[in-house]
Image (cartoon, grey):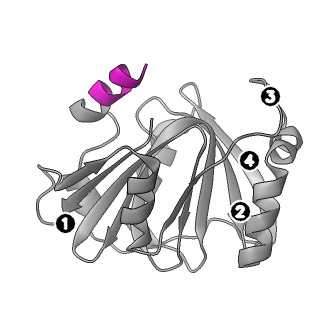
Amino acid sequence: MSELRIYSETNPGKAEAVFTRLEDIQTALSEIDVAFERWEASKLLDQDATQDEIIEAYRDPIDRLMKAHGFKSVDVISLYADHPQRAVMRDKFLHEHTHDDFEVRFFVEGEGLFNLRAKGRVYAVRCTQGDLLSVPAGTTHWFDLGPTPQLKAIRLFTTPEGWVATFTGDRIADRFPRLEAPHYDAFKRAAA
């Protein structure tokens, strides 16, 4: 189940608001120009589905976004707990950064925690299977895969370079809850 927690950027210890309903998450994120959607596959996918099969299962919403925003490429990334570089990858994404391009992620399976900093707040969005998050260029953010990642996601890009980050150097991510924080673990158990 998806969740949005909104914090003051100076008080990571207590969320000012917590949302779990799709409409509430969409409304709160729209205030910072971030899009949040839920997608369903046009056909059932199994665990071993190829990149092409996954993209084809979500062809209609992918084409809609590609046309609306001029995306030029789409791919699928997979990362699991047994990946030998999981700790290095987690650390890289956990540093606050921006992009000159949209950051668009659709969660085919698994979960991740996007933290978006805007207007003096941190918007912590726990994305799960079926969630699409579209972060505009220039939005400061960081992403947590979790200590034992389980993630398969569709990514869309307007540039051939793909994921290129400009790191801010701010250590704000070190002060905010990570995906394994107790309230996220409790939320996971309640959703199961």
- How many angstroms separate mark 1 from mark 3 (CA)? 41 Å
Whichever of labels 1 and 2 marks the residue nearer the N terminus, that label is 1
Residue 3: image location, x then y, percent: 37, 44
Residue 2: image location, x then y, percent: 44, 41
Q: Quadrant of residue 64?
A: bottom right
Say what secondary structure mark 2 lies in.
strand
Whichever of labels 4 and 3 marks the residue nearer the N terminus, that label is 3
Residue 38 lies in the magenta-colored region: no
**Pointer 1 residue:** 9
**Is 18 placed above or below 156 here?**
above
Residue 89: image location, x then y, percent: 51, 47
Q: In this rendering, which labeled residue sits more in front, label 4 or label 3?
A: 3
Residue name at image x 52 percent, y 70 percent? 165
Tag 1 near tag 4, CB within 8 Å: no
**Rendered image: mark on residue 156:** 2
**Pointer 4 residue:** 76
Q: Main secondary structure of the magenta part?
A: helix
- Amino acid found under the numbered disc labelled 2: Leu
Say what secondary structure mark 3 lies in.
loop
Q: In this rendering, which labeled residue sits more in front, label 1 or label 3?
A: 3
**Pointer 3 residue:** 44
- Amino acid found under the numbered disc labelled 1: Glu
Q: Residues within 10 Å of mark 1 (few under 14, many from 20)?
A: some
**Rendered image: mark on residue 31:** none
- How many angstroms separate mark 1 from mark 4 (CA)? 32 Å
Whichever of labels 1 and 3 marks the residue nearer the N terminus, that label is 1
Q: Which residues are magenta?
A: 185-192
> Can residue 5 be seen here?
yes
**Is 84 placed above or below 131 here?**
above
